[in-house]
Amino acid sequence: MTDRKTALDKTALVISRRKLLAGAALIAAPALLRTDLALAETRKDVVLVNFGGAAMKAFDEAYVQPFAAQGGRIVLDGSGALNGKILTMVQSGNVTWDICDGGITTLAELNPRNALEKIDYGIVDKTKVPAEFAYENGVVNYMFSSVMAWDTAKVKDTPTLADFFDLKKYPGRRMMRKDSQAMMELCLIADGVPLDKLYPLDTKRAFEKMATIKKELLYWNSGAESQSLMRDGECVMGLLWHTRANVLKAETKGRIAYSFKDGLLQPGLWVVPKGNPAGAEAFRAIASMQQPEGQVKLLAAMGNGPANPAAQSLVPADLRQTNPGDPANVAVQAKINAAWYIENHSKTFQAYLDFISS
Amino acid sequence: MAFPAPGNISVMTRSMAWAVVCFLVLPISIVFAVSLTDQPYLSLPHDGLSLQYYRGLLTSRAWLTSIWHSLVIAIASTAIAVTAGTLCAIGCWRINSRASDAVRVLMLIPIIVPTIVYALGIYQLWVDLKLIGSFAGVIIAHAVTGLPYVVITVSTALAGFDPKLEQASQSLGASMIQTLRLVIVPNILPGIISGAIFAFIHSWDEVVIVLFIAGRSVFTLPQRIWDGINESLDPTIAAVAAVLILTTVSLLFIDIAIRQRRSQ
Amino acid sequence: MRALLSRIASTETSPATDVAGALRPPSPRRLHGAMRYWLLIMPALLLMLAFYLYPIGRVLWISVTEPKPGLDNFALLATSASIHKMLVTTARISILTTVITLVLAYLVAYTLVHSGERGKRWMLLGVIVPLWISVLVRAFAWFILLRREGLINNVLIASGIIDSPLSLIWNETGVVIGMVHYMLPFGILPIYANMNDIDQRCVAAARGLGATRGAAFRKVFLPLSMPGVIGAGILVFVFSLGFFVTPALLGGGKTLMIAEYIKVQILEIVRWGVGTMLAATLLVVIGLLLAILGRIIDLRKLFGSV
């Protein structure tokens, strides 16, 4: 009982503090607008959480520095904003993160639990993102695809997604991600469901399709693992992120090939935990990160596709074919549907884990 | 305590035991080989040997900082765990009642509960207390989860310790602290040391808790390795492991050498 | 020093001093003594209560409050096929790991106590050094060794022992190999510590009385070493139950054990009620196991009571 009460008190406190801050901002607004200097003095640090690794350096160049040039400050934290962590912070009323690098599943699990701030589209420019990936509580930050890659030393010609499930035509082991997201979709596409008629997903049919090659399937956890399974010849074909497929292609000098055809285009999302410390400054940071130049830098560094359609024309010709958001690549892919995931993610993911471990 | 001559067991038993030890060190040999790889990812050397990852390790601020962070955290948390755990084991051993038995069982709980559950619990608590991303937070969490190792090993050592020694010491007028320092601790020192080693290694290798409660200012070695494995299978990981193994083995040899010199 | 003290100790407990002790007013001093020893326990107990049991208690409390108050989460234990399967997998792998670890650990510990100083030192080195390699790094060493085109398969094929590669990884075999490797030092060290305390004269006496080497081992040494084996067994089994990284990395995604299951519930699909219910169940099961074992053997012996 006391626990709940203190939690309530805390929420009340947070709310009143935020109200106060909002009020203060209103009063101070004209003064702040006067000079950039004054703005810089009072602007808060925005803590941006991603999953660490190479993204730290890439985000720094693509996002942190441009925002600093505008007088703001983004602080990177690579500790990984998993759903359970965000929810704990929000429930304790002691949020220390402002922006989290999440995805559709973040939205699917945390939105119903009321743990995410609404994106302030008064500050974040909705016209600078594809409309279908601008959600109420999350906005696309970059795009990635789940694609099929294959080992040209063992798979002749160019296989189709249907061939992934054809053990007679191309014998050998395959790999999929240890997560239902995108894997269900690719099963259905391979089974003949048109790209634009995937949702609502017929998961039963997808599992039946998977069952046909189950004895030859491995499941990867991390992107690096997916790379190593293909590179070391453990698998002849695999479904993986385009960023990893891209690195593999370069690393193996083309022995591993991949195609965007029949892939699934997904948005990486910025989400803001409810009660974030920097308040609206978080949205200013997001708005700053919408600049196409930084997004193209991120594409060059990590292969993440720019979210801003205006960035497409800035992409150098040699990078276009690796850009999942390039019009030519978008045309041959399906697009993920967030609404379906909000309804169905947890049970589908659980069913998937049960299926692969049986 | 006289043991029979070394030759008193069958050759078969002995060679099987050595086979098990070979199985134990097998991955180590792989780690050394991989650390010399010329490839950009974790793999055996392909066209030749290269020291690039050792060079990279010694010049990389990130790796060195992580080693330093891990060292500080492991030493501090081991010190806490060993002090508290040893005292607790001795107290329980001396009291020897139902209540003290209950305490001992209580001390085992951290190795029973899956770490992931504790990680969530301590994450909640540290969020409340604003200790996320602090050294203190990680040190306390590692000390508490390291306690069972110390309590177990010290208790086991105490089981082989004759309580009459302690009674004798006290009847000779020694205070409790003197008895602890001069009689009990020296006699159970091997148990305390192995507890300390386990507690240190526990902290040194712990990744699940730190992935929750570490933050921008704390970045331990296992976290860096986890980062490297998820990101790119960076062979620096193998170089780090190799350096650690070499350090350990040299420390052990120095220890042995010192002892031999003393006994001469 | 030790010998001297035990001699003093034996005179101390001679009838004469006992009488003297009985003549002293006993209770205040003894109470005081016990209180003092509780002081020794306090630091660890407080640390444990504040920074372990309290946060864990909060988490476990969720199991009866999320998503709504009641025992609904626990009902899943009876109804969920998914949970059943995962529990069976967890039990199977943990038992297998424990049994294999104990057999191998016993072998090593037995050889250790029967080795000369030199052999002992090298062997112990081989046992302790692997503790320093991160589980993460080990997993990748196994990957290099065990995969289809890995070292072991290549050597076996080249030497003509097998024709086609064995499936040593991405299945339960791989998981058990990785887990046994991790657990071995935790099995060897307690068994070895216990064997070290066995008075070898007992075995020698049995041999002297005409027992064969095998019989002397079975009838004398083995029973005397059992406390160490059981202690090590509990440690290894309990560790195995909560193991997370190795099954996740070496199982090829197909081996779902309880720790990973809980992780998914807590971190990814945020079904905290289910995840914490499983954690609570695990605690209860292990508690019961210890209780049952306590009836078979004197657990207190393991932890140093006399």
Image: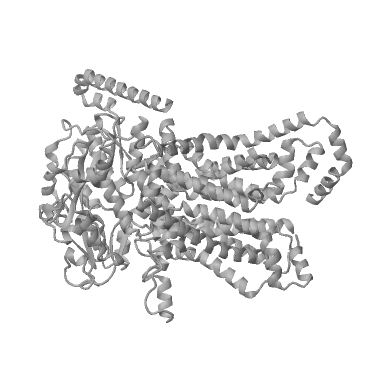
Q: Quadrant of residue C113?
A: bottom right
Residue closest to the far bottom: C160
A309 w.r.t. C47: above or below = below
Tell me the colour scheme of the image: one colour
A73 w.r.t. A253: above or below = above
Q: Where residue B115 appears, x then y in whole percent?
A: 46, 46
* Residue B151 at least partly seen: yes
Question: What is the quadrant of the C terminus of chain A in the image?
Answer: bottom left
Q: Where residue C5 appears, x then y in whole percent?
A: 81, 47
From the viewer's side, name the closer residue of C293 and B103.
C293
Q: Where residue C79 appears, x then y in whole percent?
A: 36, 49
Q: Is residue C224 left or right of residue B108?
A: right
**Point 33% across, 38% down: residue:** A86
Residue closest to the far top: A27
Question: What is the quadrant of the N terminus of chain A in the image?
Answer: top left
Q: Is residue B122 left or right of residue A341?
A: right
Q: Where residue C136 appears, x then y in whole percent?
A: 43, 56
C142 w.r.t. A306: above or below = below
Count of numbered labels shown in the rendering? 0
Q: Quadrant of residue A230?
A: bottom left
**Point 15% across, 53% down: residue:** A198
From the viewer's side, name the closer residue of C192 and C81.
C81
* Residue A294 at least partly seen: no
